[in-house]
Image (tube, helix red, strand yellow):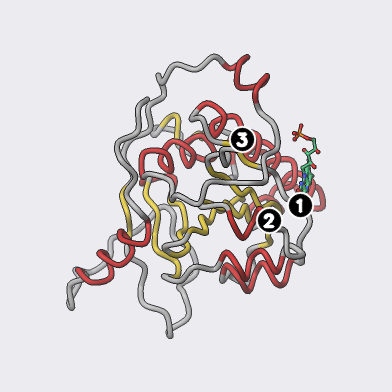
Amino acid sequence: MRPPPPLTLALTACALLACRRPNPPAPQPDPDARPAAPASTPSPAVVTLPPADPNAPFPLHRALLQRKSVRDFDPAPLSQPQIAQLAWAAQGLVDPATSRRTAPSAGALYPLELYFVTPGGSFHYLPARHAMALHNAVDRRAELAHAAFDQACVRNAPFVVVIASVTDRTRAKYGDRAPRYAAIEAGHVAQNLLLEATALGLAGVPVGGFDDDLVRKAVGLAANEEPLYVVPIGAPRAR
Ligand SMILES: Cc1cc2nc3c(=O)[nH]c(=O)nc-3n(C[C@H](O)[C@H](O)[C@H](O)COP(=O)(O)O)c2cc1C
């Protein structure tokens, strides 16, 4: 797929905030519903992502061969089509009838939540709507990098995915094995992200070295969301 010119998330976020109507219609039940943000933050605007292209040609074998950890990125923000493709590869629906997703999940209980930390703010991915809700409108990458023991790849990547788990969703059925299943699932999601990034001509690195509480604070995770993995992604910086 050939992505159109980049639209910066900063502009998107600002435009959404500026255009918000004073009296929004009553919200409809949302299959991605999660605990409300603290009262001090505005209710999130939602960015509907362009449809992902499941037929974009790139051989899986080539993605496996070319995937490698990259830690130095071009600072240019990703385009919405790029974000859409990455989001779909990570947790998008493949069958709306059953809500099955691109990554496997124990018991199809889907405990993982994805947050995109970008120069234009942080967004929460809503798989059922293939949309992302503005979570906070400030650039939290420096705070997130600090939480990851000051790893520069987190500070400098234009797009950082935080994979968090609401493990109680899985615990209800699988008890003490739930944390194991959630961690395994985060690995599936991260690999999908890294292979999709490779197919898009981007790259990333899976980051497991971070302080959980500081990541929670940087992203603004709910009390029941545990950060499992951080995946900075961008175009590799030309040398
Ligand atoms: C569980 C896990 C945690 C990792 N944590 C970090 C990290 O905190 N920082 C980092 O730069 N790379 C991290 N990596 C990336 C590895 O360093 C990298 O995968 C390894 O050097 C092999 O290189 P490759 O990914 O290019 O094949 C992590 C990888 C895994 C699987």
Mark sitting on residue 77: none
Residue drawn at the location 51% of the way across and 34% of the way down: 89
Considering the numbered disc 3 on the image, is that residue within a helix, a strand or a loop? helix
Q: CA distance from mark 3 to mark 2?
A: 23 Å
- According to the picture, the residue beneath numbered tag 3 turns out to be 194
- According to the picture, the residue beneath numbered tag 2 turns out to be 167
* Mark 2 vs mark 1: in front: 1
Q: In the rendered view, does 184 fall on the left or right side of 104?
A: right
Q: In the rendered view, does 116 fall on the left or right side of 153?
A: left
Q: In the rendered view, does 87 fall on the left or right side of 61?
A: left
Identify the image quadrant of residue 81: top left
- According to the picture, the residue beneath numbered tag 1 turns out to be 208
**Residue 196: percent from left, percent from top:** 54, 31
Q: In the rendered view, does 39 fall on the left or right side of 177?
A: left
Amino acid type, mark 3? Leu
* Between 103 and 64, the one nearer to me in the picture: 64
Query: In this picture, is 239 found above or below 115?
Result: above
Which label's residue is closer to the chain start, 3 or 2? Answer: 2
Label 3 C-beta lies within 8 Å of the nearest ligand 1 atom:
yes
**Residue 189: percent from left, percent from top:** 62, 39
**Residue 75: percent from left, percent from top:** 50, 52
Residue drawn at the location 72% of the way across and 50% of the way down: 207
Q: CA distance from mark 3 to mark 1?
A: 14 Å
